[in-house]
Image (cartoon, rainbow, N blue to C red):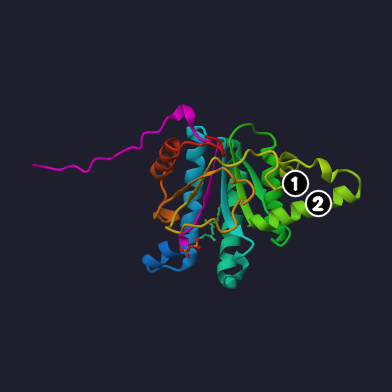
């Protein structure tokens, strides 16, 4: 008797997708190590996974995908690894500039871009500029991003507005303060996914993920497939979101 491994497709209600999915793209280093490859090969493979998942996210009808590409803490990594990630981002954005007219994926960047190379900064600005002409799906890339750093920057900018008389601290609302974040104008993530088996938030979207659902999987980011995304969404669709109510 023959046994066939059944390809189980997660049951997803395509009419009720999360609007905004955020992903901590973790596990590139371990993926490479398991193959006897340098860590940078893991990041290269991770960049391809991002390309694939962003295209799929757009095709199934998500509105926003936000990914953690480089944190404010990632500068502590060996110089060669930081340079390799920056080169990959440059390569990715150069290719994106070429393919955006076809793919129509809007791009935005969350984070302080000023320490990045002038070329990378210019590419970020160029892709954001091109994006202004597009409607629909948006990919947000967190670059030199840290959740605490973002909140501190927002507090500084808000304090400056108070001192200048442009804001009144007695009337500050959460929505007002949210408008000082890098994510201004983008709805909060509904679902935050962390692959690679780590179960922590690592300074990602601290303000925005207050009511997000979290999904953790052991799959390493370079192996993260379209089916893995559907599994995460199917799991999300079984959650009961109460936002503090009953
Ligand atoms: C975390 O894995 C990954 C990073 C810090 C870098 C992510 C960067 C990319 C995927 C490439 C460029 C991105 C885009 C959007 C084109 P890790 O190195 O911490 O893995 P480990 O925990 O297994 O060591």
Residue 108: % across, % down: 65, 45
Residue 47: % across, % down: 51, 54
Quarter of image, res 234: top left
Q: Is residue 13 inside the magenta stretch?
A: yes
Residue 162: % across, % down: 87, 48
Residue 73: % across, % down: 62, 65
Q: Nearer the viewer, residue 90 or 200?
A: 200
For image coordinates 70% across by 48% down, the residue present is 182
Q: Nearer the viewer, residue 52 or 95?
A: 52
Q: Residue furthest left?
A: 1
Query: Regarding mark 2 in the picture, which secondary structure is present there?
Result: helix
Q: Residue under circle 1? A: 180
Q: Are marks 2 and 1 in contact (CB under 8 Å)?
A: yes
Residue 39 lies, with reference to residue 130, above or below; the image says below
Q: Is residue 122 visible?
A: yes
Horizontally, is 59 left or right of 125 in the view? left
Horizontally, is 20 left or right of 133 in the view? left
Q: Nearer the viewer, residue 141 or 38?
A: 141
Q: Is residue 121 visible?
A: no
* Marked residue nearer the N-terminal end (2 or 1): 2
Residue 73 lies, with reference to residue 178, above or below; the image says below
Which residues are the magenta region?
1-28
Mark 1 is surrounded, within 10 Å at the Cα level, by few (under 14), some (14 to 19) or many (20 or more) other residues, namely some
Mark 2 is surrounded, within 10 Å at the Cα level, by few (under 14), some (14 to 19) or many (20 or more) other residues, namely some
Q: Main secondary structure of the magenta part?
A: loop
For image coordinates 44% across by 55% down, the residue present is 222
Q: Residue furthest bottom?
A: 78
Residue 17: assigned label: none
Residue 125 lies, with reference to residue 56, above or below; the image says below
Task: Calculate the distance from the C-alpha at mark 2 to the C-alpha at mark 1.
Answer: 7 Å
Residue 157: assigned label: 2
Residue 137 lies, with reference to residue 91, above or below; the image says above
């Amino acid at each position: 008797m023959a046994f066939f491994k059944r390809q189980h497709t997660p049951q997803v209600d395509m009419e009720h997708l999360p609007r905004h999915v955020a992903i901590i793209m973790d596990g590139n280093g371990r993926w490479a190590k398991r193959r006897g490859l340098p860590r940078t090969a893991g990041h290269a493979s991770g960049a391809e996974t991002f390309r694939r998942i962003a295209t799929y996210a757009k095709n199934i009808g998500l509105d926003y995908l936000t990914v953690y590409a480089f944190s404010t803490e990632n500068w502590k990594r060996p110089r060669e690894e930081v340079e390799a990630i920056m080169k990959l981002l440059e390569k990715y954005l150069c290719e994106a500039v070429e393919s955006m007219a076809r793919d129509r994926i809007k791009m935005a960047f969350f984070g302080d871009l000023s320490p990045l190379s002038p070329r990378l900064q210019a590419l970020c600005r160029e892709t954001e500029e091109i994006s202004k002409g597009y409607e629909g799906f948006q990919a947000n890339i967190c670059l030199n991003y840290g959740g605490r750093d973002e909140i501190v920057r927002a507090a500084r900018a808000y304090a400056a507005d108070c001192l200048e008389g442009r804001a009144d601290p007695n009337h500050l609302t959460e929505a007002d303060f949210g408008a000082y974040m890098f994510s201004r104008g983008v709805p909060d993530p509904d679902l935050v996914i962390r692959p690679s088996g780590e179960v922590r938030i690592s300074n990602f979207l601290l303000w925005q993920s207050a009511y997000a659902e979290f999904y953790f999987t052991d799959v390493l980011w370079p192996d993260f497939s379209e089916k893995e995304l559907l599994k995460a969404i199917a799991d999300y669709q079984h959650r009961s979101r109460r936002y503090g109510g009953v």
